[in-house]
Image (cartoon, rainbow, N blue to C red):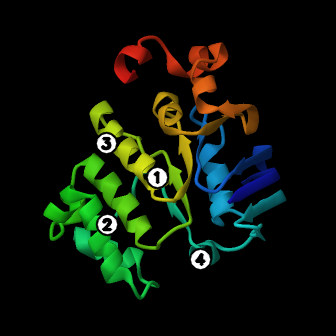
Amino acid sequence: MLLVRNLHCGYGSLGVVKGVSLHVADGEIVALIGANGAGKSTLLKAIAGLLAPWRGEVHIGGRNTTGEPAWRGVVHSVVLVPEGRQVFADMTVYENLVLGGFRNPDRRLLIEEVLRQFPRLQERAGQLAGTLSGGEQQMLAIGRALIAHPRLLLLDEPSLGLAPLVVRDVLRVIRRLRDDGVTVFLVEQNAVAALHIADRAYVLETGEVTLEGDARDLLHNPEVKRAYLGKGYKEVWE
């Protein structure tokens, strides 16, 4: 579903992503973990078409999409849920969902399905999005993305700023999406959360992939545990 080959990109003269290669198979959740500033969000922007790569290639669904604008990705069912949720605060939950399906003639049916999947959004359909809790806003951002009926869902730091119990709720939603046939590429600083739901994962350090493999193997990798997991993660997550 997603193939990245030797991708280089950055801002101005500053190189941030330095020769990254990775792949995401159809029906997988693949996580990209790393410290703040490692280049995770920059890589995601290049994949989504928000940042032009300097070198390398991006292929999505067998198409070479390198350098295509973001709207072309949406046309081909690639949807990004950005960092910080970025819901339309002065619009209702329902209006946010309508905007997610602006190009989809079946959006009314899809909105009904999303509201069934997210009962809290259904309860708050007429409420302004800016008055929702952080977890509810994240679910709205994911729900809005689903109205576009994505084949590939790109998630940028979905656990950011959320309490651990809320993070668990969001992770259950992401896992359920995979079970429903949505391919997910998850960029996440919370390595514990990401590795518990991903099938495979990559570790990004200063713009380069330094480790890759089965998510469960990485969860127990001494280097990953020392750098990203910390003490006590088993008591919280297992």
In this rendering, would 37 be left or right of 165?
A: right
Mark 1 residue type: Asp
* Disc 3 to disc 2, C-alpha distance: 15 Å
**Which residue matches tag 2?**
114
Residue 169 has which mark?
3
As drawn, the label of residue 179 is 1
Q: Which element type, helix, strand or loop, lies under badge 2?
A: helix
Q: Earlier in the sequence, mark 4 or mark 3?
A: 4
Pointers 4 and 3 in contact (C-beta within 8 Å) = no
The residue where tag 4 is placed is 71
Q: Gap in Å between the C-alphas at discs 1 and 4? A: 26 Å
Distance, label 3 to label 1, CA atoms, is 15 Å
Q: Nearer the viewer, mark 4 or mark 3?
A: 3
Q: CA distance from mark 2 to mark 1?
A: 15 Å
The quadrant of the rendering that contains the C terminus is: top left
Give above or below for 33 relative to 42: above
Q: Where does residue 223 sit, x and y in percent of width and height?
A: 66, 16
In this orientation, which residue lies closer to the viewer: 227 or 105? Answer: 105
Question: Tag 2 or tag 4, which sits nearer the N-term?
Answer: 4
Nearer the viewer's eye, disc 3 or disc 1?
1
